[in-house]
Image (tube, rainbow, N blue to C red):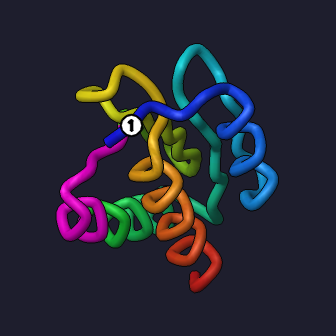
Amino acid sequence: MEKFTDEQIYDYLGQLDGWEYVDGAIETTFEFKDFKEAFSVMTRIAFECEAQGHHPDWSNVYKTVNIRLSTHDANGVTEKDFELARSIEEIVESE
């Protein structure tokens, strides 16, 4: 998969709400009602990550989930990251 240019990344970010390009990756933070809801959504995201064969760098503290996406093989952001970001958005919106 080919690494995107900064211009391509910023163009694609216009299609996502709340995502930013920081230090070679796209990232966002979601806040949920409580830990149980945050963990439930993380579990759903984990299954989607497995299905896409692409995995985030992420963390969870109580009701907050931080997600950072980049394609390690390409050493930057690729279409795979935006595909997963869109899927994550759909999962979060469905809650």
Who is closer to the viewer here, 7 or 52?
A: 7
Could you tell me which quadrant the N terminus lies in? top left
Callout 1: SS: loop
Toward which corner of the image does residue 6 lie, by quadrant?
top right
Which span of residues is magenta-colored?
Answer: 47-56
Which residue is depicted at the point 18% across and 62% down? 50
Residue 79 pos. (x, y %): 46, 51
Depicted 80 relative to depicted 3: above or below: below
Q: Main secondary structure of the magenta part?
A: helix
Depicted 80 relative to depicted 25: above or below: below
Residue 43 pos. (x, y %): 30, 65
Which residue is depicted at the point 56% across and 77% down? 90
Residue 64 visible in image: yes
- Residue under label 1: 2
Q: Callout 1: 10 Å neighbours few (<14), some, many (20+)?
A: few
Which residue is depicted at the point 64% across and 21% down? 22
Could you tell me which quadrant the C terminus lies in? bottom right
Residue 61 visible in image: no
The amino acid pointed to by label 1 is Glu
Which residue is depicted at the point 64% across and 43% down? 29
Q: Is residue 94 left or right of residue 45?
A: right
